[in-house]
Image (cartoon, rainbow, N blue to C red):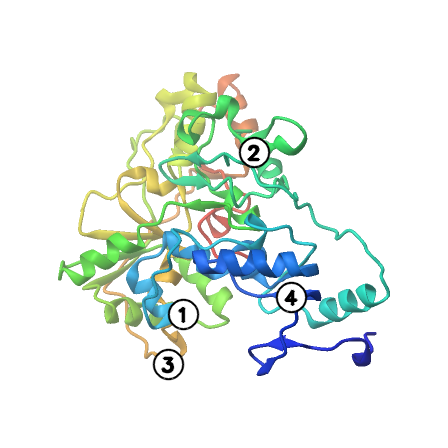
Amino acid sequence: MVNEKNFEIVYSTLLGIDKETENFDISLIEGAVVSNEDIERLKDIRRRSKILIAMGSCAVLGGVPSLRRFASEQELKNVYNVIYVPHLSDASPLSKFVTVDYFLRGCPINRYELLNLLDKLSRNEWFKQDERRFLFLREKPLNLEGVALSLDGEKCIVCGRCVKICQEITSAIDYINRSFETAVSTPFKVKLDESTCISCGQCILYCPVGAIVEKSYVTEVWKLLNSGMHLTAYVEPEVLMALSEALKLDVNRRLVTALKKIGFEKVVLWKPQTEFNTSDQLTILPSSEAEAIFVQRFYPDLVNYMAPPPRIKDNSIVWFSPCVARKLSGNLVLTTRELIRLLGTMDLSLLTKTQFDEIKMNVANKHEVEVVGMREIRKTLESIREGKLKAGRIVLYVCPGGCLHGGGQPLQS
């Protein structure tokens, strides 16, 4: 372990030490770069340092400050209590501007990783860290846009997790180019919606750096609430289950209180329902737009068997769902993750419980068969195509494990 006598701290604003010297053996820098002054200061430190270490999520990836590109003023107030408008359009990691020798990830960092790194450096043991990070900057990052999803090429570290999960679904994205030009893209760099992407959002759950995100409507909902519009919240049961697990708290009726506190007039517990022909003929019931698009693109000969996916016709309803693909429905849809951001720093454990204004849950039908996961969906659709399956109501769920594991659910550490 590190011997404290091997190191002398000569500069630290937190510790009140100001013995800044001409050169440094090791510089540990926290925080994202948010201004032109930061860039100049960072380059100066790099020039004077033998070793430069990016310490913490903000310095390594841009961290919470970089999320402001997706945030409204209200969300920024919830995080910082004040509005700070930096000179740069976006907060960036240190590696965008200088060469970083070592990365200490986490918020906060693991102190044992720091001590281990300092111990090795004190003994002049240089080593390569076990992470796939390119020590270069693409001059033109490859960004992908879609109605429901987007990929930020500048954040992407080409780890391949999104590619792997997508290969199990529709193979909409894959690696392109070679060597240091390797990137993740759709074929011919077309927009996500022009590829085989069905907007299931599973890639979001697998991305370790937040390079792939859903298009957020939190700002729009805040504007509607602040305008005094009478809004009704439709909440799917899987949203309650995921929130309860994430917060380690039974949020059920507390969520009703929270939503009414921020301005919703009514809160309804709702299981999405699909309109379909009540006859005994074979019917394919897509649980969302994702399943409908999949059938249209890969099994167009079966489209006549398919009912439309669930939708809401009332524009005064905000739909809270575990599903990213519902954003393609034309409704105002917020995922469970967006709901968490909408609630901000509100502590649900301190709220009283309020009954739902209405509960709309469809009654299970003995003729319905739920088909979960892409492997089972393909097998079932092939059986229909081959004429082996001729009757019944087939409900399709693209996401592994069904809606509870939808692409819009909270990220798991």
What is the three-letter code of the residue carrying label 2? Val
Please identify the residue farthest to the front as the structure is shown. 22
The residue identified by callout 4 is 28
Q: Nearer the viewer, residue 48 or 206?
A: 48
Gap in Å between the C-alphas at discs 2 and 4? Answer: 31 Å
Are circles 4 and 3 on residues that touch, CB within 8 Å? no
Q: Nearer the viewer, residue 354 or 395?
A: 354
The residue identified by callout 1 is 251
Gap in Å between the C-alphas at discs 2 and 3? Answer: 44 Å
Q: Nearer the viewer, mark 2 or mark 4?
A: 4
What is the three-letter code of the residue carrying label 1? Val
Badge 2 marks a residue whose secondary structure is strand
The residue identified by callout 2 is 184
Q: Badge 2 local density, few (<14 within 10 Å), some, or many (20+)?
A: many
Of the image marks 2 and 4, the number of the one nearer the N terminus: 4
Viewport quadrant of the C terminus: bottom right
Q: Nearer the viewer, mark 4 or mark 1?
A: 4
Residue drawn at x 64%, y 50% as measured from the top left: 99
Q: Quadrant of residue 179?
A: top right
Q: Position of residue 48 (x, y in %)?
A: 66, 61
Q: Badge 1 local density, few (<14 within 10 Å), some, or many (20+)?
A: many
The residue identified by callout 3 is 350
